[in-house]
Amino acid sequence: MATDNHRIRREVSELSLLFDISQALDRTMDLREEVKPILEIIAKHTGMVRGTLTLLDRETGEIHIEAAHGLSQDQRARGRYRPGEGVTGRVVQTGEPMAIPKISEEPMFLDRTGARKGLSKQDVSFICVPIKIENEVIGALSVDCLFADSVSLDEDVRLLSIIASMIAQAVRLRQESQKERQRLIDENIRLQARLEDKFSPANIIGTSSAMQAVYELIAQVAKSDTTVLIRGESGVGKELVANAIHYSSRRADKPFIRVNCAALPESVIESELFGHEKGAFTGAIAQRKGRFELADAGTIFLDEIGDISPGTQIHLLRVLQEREFERVGGTKTIQVNVRVIASTNRDLEGSMERWEFRQDLYYRLNVFPIHIPPLRERRADILLLANHFVEKYAKANNKQIRRIAAPAADLLLHYHWPGNVRQLENCIERAVLVTTDGVIRGHHLPPTLQPAEPQEPAGGGTLRQKLDHTERALIIEALADAQGNMAKAARTLGVTERIMGLRVNKFGLSPKEFKQRR
């Protein structure tokens, strides 16, 4: 019974340690920012006296200490090796772990850092395991006195090897993510180089192929007086396209009048559009010009045209056909020379079928349609837009923002953006306000962008429930990192594919779900 209790306590301790490390690795895509906290987590759970993570520099051939726990800066600086030199060098060279029960009895142990001088080396054990990506050793993880004397070093080597495997997996995924970000950056650079001589509105950010098609349509229609209908989801930037058309046209120095049709009550929209005479209705104490009259010789932009009432649609149809109207309460016909640009996020075809939108007005508006793609269909533009908004709001708030950290960039790239560019802008504005060190990190972004995490057992739960909760969280983390690949996830956790399959079935998880997340 005592043996079973000891085994259970050790399992709980190991699961808790591995879960905390997985959480730390998930917080940032910059491994250097999380290596020291990982060592501190190991020390907290195991009582480790010293620990180091060493990396192999391929250019110099030298192994150096990247991060350490329990070592001074001078001691860290002295900890340099060549492959094959000392225990750490041998582990990096061979790719095999080494466990030294007593460092005083091992001549290969060099203690180059000098951290063990003056100590009783009879009581110090040393374990060093390789960090490998596939078959390539990139460094090593080592500890002094990982566990109590009652625990065999074999168990310590096994646990430390799992941690090293988790670090290696995180490094590999970060490398793949960096390659993808670099590919998007290179694609943007190539597009910009190809499009230097092509039309590109100064007020619109984006170099994706989807936006290039929009730019071509803007260039084709801008110099004419043709009516344009801009379509797209809310927040994609329809008003920016309307601006680009007007200020690229022959009317650029004439008025550009904006009307938000959805924001105007039905009782006043006709007065706003066409004006009114003095005494036309209660409160009309003076004659007033409408938006169409103010836009004479220029452009009027009717935003959210799909929201106007049937009565207003009739009056609007006449203006589009004849370019003339009467003010509310007046009899004098007023003629205008105005270009009409309209926009909507509604399904006008469906509205026509339901008799909510006039068919003849639809065809008058839909002379030259331009569709603005949602942000999720032009992911190559996300980081360009994000950096633009960072610069904008850093300047507005008098803050110095150096960069968007890699994990934050990944969250931006993988989010589905239902609110499109407007939502992205709001997220960046918030992040600029909350950051304190000049770097926008993942936790500065709104909770809606954060990856989902499993709920803890209600009321704390029994030991079995807590174990299941922790195990499920580790499996979800491994599946997410492996993009649903069961074999890779199993290797990350140090279990067989059969055990992995049983655990996935036990917790009702679907590997396909994690492929979709990435």
Image (cartoon, rainbow, N blue to C red):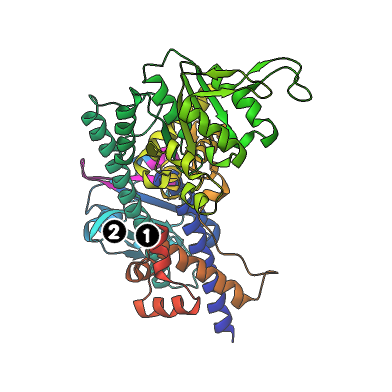
Q: Amino acid at mark 1?
A: Ala
Give the Cα distance between marks 1 and 2.
8 Å
**Residue with the most extreme right position:** 282
Q: Is 63 drawn above or below residue 392 in the view shown?
A: below
Tell me the residue at 46%/53% (across/down).
26
Q: Is 451 drawn above or below residue 441 in the view shown?
A: below
- Which quadrant of the rendered structure holds the N terminus? bottom right
Tell me the residue at 56%/70% (across/down).
469
Q: Residues within 10 Å of mark 1 (few under 14, many from 20)?
A: many
| Label annotation for residue 132 | 2
Q: Which residue is mark 1?
A: 164
**Residue with the most extreme bottom position:** 1
Q: Which residues are magenta?
A: 56-76
Q: Position of residue 62 (x, y in %)?
A: 24, 44
Mark before the other along the chain sequence, 1 or 2: 2
Q: Amino acid at mark 2?
A: Lys
Q: Secondary structure at mark 1?
A: helix
- Which quadrant of the rendered structure holds the C terminus? bottom left
